[in-house]
Image (spheres, rainbow, N blue to C red):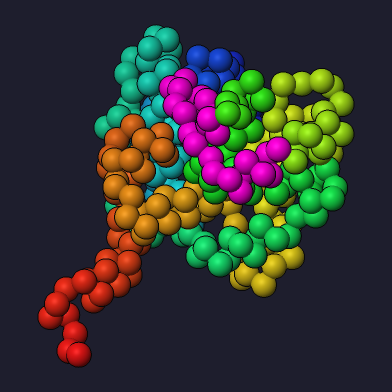
Amino acid sequence: MDSKNDIMVPELTNYLEYLKYQKNYSDYTILNYQDDILEYLNYIKSESLDFKSIQYSDIRFYLMYLKDNKRDDNSSINRKLSSLRGFYKYLANEKVVDSNVFSLVNGPKKSKKLPRYFEYNELEELFLIPDKTLPLGQRDSLLLEMLYATGVRVGELVQIKVSDIDLGNRSILILGKGNKERYVTYGEYCEEALKLYLEDGRVALNTHNSDYLFFNHNGGVLTERGVRYILNQIIQKTSIHKNISPHMIRHSFATHLLNQGCDLLTVQKLLGHESIKATQIYTHVTTDRLKEVYYHSFPRAKKD
């Protein structure tokens, strides 16, 4: 199915506006929802079906199409189902459809993946790359330091305004998922990078006199996609053979806190997780640290 033949039905346009203005979803997340739903609508069109009167049996065939024709993995299929559940819940609430038929559908069993993270020495190599004599280098240095120091999501990072920062207390007011506010703290390394950027680089980049913290080279507000591009450019200049993403730095933040003895509840609050279950994925990556403490502390762990 050719994306050039995508048809943006009015119901989808309304739903995307609902996600943006009512749910406060990021542009990146909304774009992913749009792609998932358009793919589904194209399939429905190719099968001469009406998305407003879809049946459970039709969905099973769609799942077979994703698995056999598209070769999607279980994680991708579950993500697409989640997008469609949200869309049809909205349609049901708006009385466009009688019920959310996707609420009856269980996706394939999700394979558990360990969260990928950087070792601290790898992060140190990343921190050395930006040229702090240049405005963009100062921005990139702060971007790295702030992602690691606070563990914020990339969508939260690009929304930070200077007025959200309490320089005296080294804290930032973050607007998280569902418009929930929380404060995050940053340390001395981030403070140093922030001070340099505010006094120099940001002055040069902020050509439109905006209150936002991060800007692109044209003076526009930096986007989530822009952050990902910057990180990809940085890692290519290192000896590190790993893919990089803002979320991987967030994983590193949580993992390193736990490895240094921080309790899970505190990490949950710092990450802005609504449930402790979301934070528990990090506990298994601290096994090496637990072994180290055991062999160092337990009297009969090893012979003299």
User: What is the quadrant of the N terminus in the image?
Assistant: top right
- Using the image, determine if residue 157 lies above or below residue 114: above
- Using the image, determine if residue 228 lies above or below residue 53: below
Residue 186 x/y as whole percent: 53, 40
Residue 262 x/y as whole percent: 33, 50
Q: Is residue 171 magenta?
A: yes
Residue 296 x/y as whole percent: 25, 75
**Residue 27 can be seen, yes or no:** no
- Going by the picture, which residue comes out furthest to the bottom? 304
- Going by the picture, which residue comes out furthest to the front? 168
Identify the residue at horizontal 67%, vertical 44% (top origin): 192
Q: Is residue 207 magenta?
A: no
Identify the residue at horizontal 32%, vertical 67% (top origin): 289
Identify the residue at horizontal 58%, vertical 52% (top origin): 245
Frontmost residue, 149 versus 282: 149
Judge from the rendering whether residue 272 lies leftward or rightward of residue 46; answer left or right: left
- The segment highlighted magenta reads 169-195
Judge from the rendering whether residue 264 lies leftward or rightward of residue 228; answer left or right: left
Frontmost residue, 111 versus 286: 286
**Residue 234 can be seen, yes or no:** yes
Identify the residue at horizontal 39%, vertical 9% (top origin): 95
User: What is the quadrant of the C terminus in the image?
Assistant: bottom left
Judge from the rendering whether residue 63 lies leftward or rightward of residue 34; answer left or right: left
Residue 292 x/y as whole percent: 30, 72
